[in-house]
Amino acid sequence: MSDVKIEEPHEKTGDTVAPENKEKEAELAEIHRKESTNCQASKLLLNWGALFFLTLVSILRGDGKAPSIVGLTSYTMGDWVALVILALGLVGLTVVAIKGVLLPESAAK
């Protein structure tokens, strides 16, 4: 008789849920609650990081007509270095987003 599983009705659907699945269901409900809001700090910080890189490189590169505030002019080595720094920074943020945010969230589901 010890191997008989007691099932209780699901609170929303009325379906029965095995006791061992209750914990997993509670975890999924918590993940859903967190993801149903616009205030997801880890994802917002990645967006702000990308905006920071874009703004920084825009200031460093200037408008192309006159030298920037650090003396860079268009199509010079410094201008291209700033562009490469932007690209590497954004690739780095993408790697952090995948490995640090998306994969752990996906594994939890």
Image: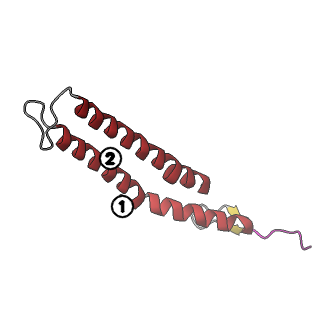
Image quarter of residue 59: top left
- Identify which amino acid the numbered label 1 is placed on: Cys
Marks 2 and 1, the one that precedes in the sequence: 1
Q: Is residue 25 left or right of residue 4?
A: left
Q: Position of residue 65 (x, y in %)?
A: 8, 30
- Tell me the residue at 59%/64% (across/down): 27
Q: Residue furthest top?
A: 75
- Identify which amino acid the numbered label 2 is placed on: Ala
Q: Is residue 81 left or right of residue 108?
A: left
- Tell me the residue at 89%/69% (across/down): 3
- Check whether the beta carbons of the residues at disc 2 and disc 1 lie within 8 A of each other: no
The kind of secondary structure element at disc 2 is helix
Q: Position of residue 46 (x, y in %)?
A: 37, 52
Q: Which residues are magenta?
A: 1-7
Q: Is residue 99 left or right of residue 73?
A: right
On residue 39, the disc is 1
Which residue was labeled with disc 2?
Answer: 50
Magenta: main secondary structure equals loop
Report, in whole angstroms, how far the alpha carbon at label 2 lies from the one at label 1.
Answer: 17 Å
Q: Position of residue 51 (x, y in %)?
A: 28, 48
Q: Position of residue 54 (x, y in %)?
A: 26, 43
Of 9 and 81, which appears nearest the observer? 81
Vertical placement of 108 versus 94: above or below? below
